[in-house]
């Protein structure tokens, strides 16, 4: 009795002889042409005989291609798997490492608190000093060229002295020959090439003792010579008297 191995060997030998007789293996184009009936009879018979001897080739060339059978994923399957991977990474991602808290010693905190208090007290003191009322002094002035108390004329006198750390109630004195409806006072800065107006005070009240009081804040005045001019106004302003002042720092 012949065994299976012997039978298979005999079968393989017969197939090999027949394949050698059929010539070249048929191409895919030939198989397609055979399936459409486009081959001549002689060629069609040769291809049929060859395919009978190559069953594996016939299956590869004629069976439809199925990606799922070859282990290749479709676009939908690939997107589904990627979504699963993203979700798994999101769930298992490590928490961010917290920034290490810097701990300060009680001594450092006490020093910082003390420094803040000192700065606050210093700021408060400076503000109190700047907001504190400045000292005010009253100073009677006489026109240039007139000594104190003598309105009729005398040698030129020295400028009146003012300090930048004191505010003043100036009382320029002058007895006009006529009466005026209004009196104005103008302060000029003489430190510039041309006298520059610092301010003009209108409708200054004439007092019974023939003085014209005006408050002067010297805090914003630069040290130097200034001139105070008294005007009488009857429609037009007429200069009546001048007073030279010297502002200095103490």
Image (spheres, grey):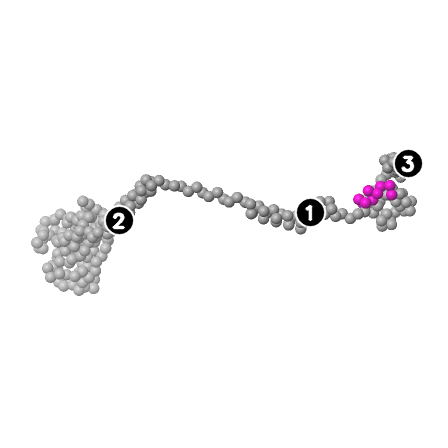
Which dot, 2 or 1, sits closer to the camera?
1
Is residue 173 part of the magenta span, yes or no?
no
Q: Using residue 94 as the reference point, say whether residue 127 is left or right of it.
A: left
Image x and y of residue 176, in percent:
12, 60
Image x and y of residue 137, in percent:
15, 52
Residue sitting nearer the eye, 195 or 60: 60
On-image quarter of the N terminus: top right
Q: Give me the residue at 76% from left, 47% from top.
A: 65
Location of mark 3 (residue): 1
Identify the magenta region.
Answer: 52-61
Q: Secondary structure at mark 2?
A: helix
Which dot, 1 or 3, sits closer to the camera?
3
Q: Label 3, label 2: how many angstroms apart (C-alpha)? A: 123 Å
Q: Give me the residue at 21% from left, 60% from top.
A: 202
Q: Secondary structure at mark 1?
A: loop
Residue sitting nearer the eye, 134 or 169: 134
Location of mark 1 (residue): 73
Location of mark 2 (residue): 124
Disc ID at residue 22: none
Q: Label 2, label 1: how many angstroms apart (C-alpha)? A: 78 Å
Q: Are marks 1 and 3 in contact (CB under 8 Å)?
A: no
Decide which of tag 3 and tag 2 comes sooner along the chain.
3
């Amino acid at each position: 009795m012949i065994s299976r191995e012997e039978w298979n060997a005999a079968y393989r030998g017969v197939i090999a002889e027949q394949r050698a007789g059929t010539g070249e293996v048929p191409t895919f184009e030939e198989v397609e042409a055979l399936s459409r009936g486009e081959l001549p009879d002689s060629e069609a018979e040769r291809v049929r005989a060859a395919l009978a001897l190559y069953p594996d080739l016939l299956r590869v060339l004629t069976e439809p291609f199925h990606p799922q059978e070859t282990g290749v994923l479709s676009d939908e399957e690939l997107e589904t798997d990627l979504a699963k991977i993203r979700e798994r990474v999101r769930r298992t991602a490590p928490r961010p490492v917290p920034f290490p808290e810097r701990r300060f010693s009680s001594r450092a905190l006490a020093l910082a608190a003390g420094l803040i208090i000192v700065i606050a007290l210093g700021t408060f003191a400076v503000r109190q000093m700047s907001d504190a009322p400045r000292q005010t002094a009253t100073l009677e002035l006489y026109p240039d060229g007139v000594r104190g108390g003598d309105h009729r004329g005398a040698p030129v006198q020295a400028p009146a002295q003012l300090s930048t750390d004191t505010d003043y109630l100036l009382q320029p004195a002058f007895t006009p020959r006529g009466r005026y409806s209004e009196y104005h006072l103008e302060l000029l800065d003489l430190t510039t090439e041309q006298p520059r107006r610092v301010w003009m005070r209108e409708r200054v009240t004439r007092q019974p003792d023939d003085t014209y009081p005006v408050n002067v804040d010297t805090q914003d005045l630069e040290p130097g010579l200034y001139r105070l001019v008294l005007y009488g106004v009857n429609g037009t302003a007429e200069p009546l008297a001048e007073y030279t002042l010297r502002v200095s720092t103490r």
